[in-house]
């Protein structure tokens, strides 16, 4: 989804809940092959949506850091703000990954480390 999509959703009065999981970077890429190119500037996505909203239409945003805040934000989005586009940015630790992702990342890393086949 792009910023333009969010802008259009607000303009058209969409009553959608958008969850953005923000782990501060490219965790999946780090698990495949770590390097300085995986360090990116973390954006304030909630602030971006607030800027797009600019008090035109109906929009509500929240940034949550734990399960209790997430539960509260979902409750607000489905009750008091159910007539708005709701954008909830969920902040998670950059290394918050599943065992399956770690295993998959190591397999892809090993496959990427093989010498080229050169059509043989």
Image (cartoon, rainbow, N blue to C red):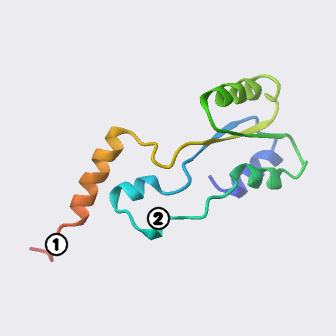
Q: Residue at x 22, y 59 (%)?
A: 110
Look at the image and tell me in which quarter the C terminus lies. Answer: bottom left
* Left or right side of 40 for 33: left
| Location of residue 120 with respect to 7 vertically, above or below | below
Residue 6, position as x, y percentages in the image: 72, 50
Residue 102, labelled with which disc?
A: none
Look at mark 1 in the image and give the residue it sits on.
115
Q: Residue at x 34, y 58 (%)?
A: 32
**Mark 1: few/some/many CA within 10 Å (<14, 14-19, 20+):** few
Q: Nearer the viewer, residue 46 or 119?
A: 46
Labels 2 and 1: the sequence-earlier one: 2
* Left or right side of 43 for 83: right
Residue 38, labelled with which disc?
A: 2
Secondary element at image label 1: loop
Q: Residue at x 60, y 64 (%)?
A: 41
Residue 62, position as x, y percentages in the image: 74, 39
**Mark 2: few/some/many CA within 10 Å (<14, 14-19, 20+):** some
* Left or right side of 65 for 107: left
Residue 102, position as x, y percentages in the image: 33, 46
Q: Residue at x 45, y 47 (%)?
A: 95
All told, the count of numbered labels is 2
Marks 2/1 in contact by CB < 8 Å: the verdict is no
Residue 99, position as x, y percentages in the image: 33, 39
Residue at the left extreme? 120
Residue at the bottom extreme? 118
Secondary element at image label 2: helix
Q: Quadrant of residue 61?
A: top right
Q: Nearer the viewer, residue 4 or 52?
A: 52
Cα distance, mark 2 to mark 1? 23 Å
* Left or right side of 87 for 101: left
| Location of residue 51 with respect to 77 vertically, above or below | below
């Amino acid at each position: 989804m792009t910023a333009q999509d969010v802008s259009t959703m607000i303009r058209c009065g969409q009553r959608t809940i958008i969850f953005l999981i923000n782990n501060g970077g490219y965790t999946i890429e780090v698990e495949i092959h770590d390097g300085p190119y995986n360090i990116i500037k973390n954006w304030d996505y909630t602030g971006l949506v607030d800027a797009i909203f600019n008090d035109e239409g109906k929009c509500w945003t929240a940034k949550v850091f734990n399960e209790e805040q997430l539960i509260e934000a979902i409750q607000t989005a489905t009750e008091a703000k159910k007539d708005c586009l709701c954008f909830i940015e969920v902040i998670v630790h950059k290394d918050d990954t599943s065992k399956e992702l770690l295993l998959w990342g190591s397999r892809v890393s090993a496959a990427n480390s093989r010498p080229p086949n050169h059509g043989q």
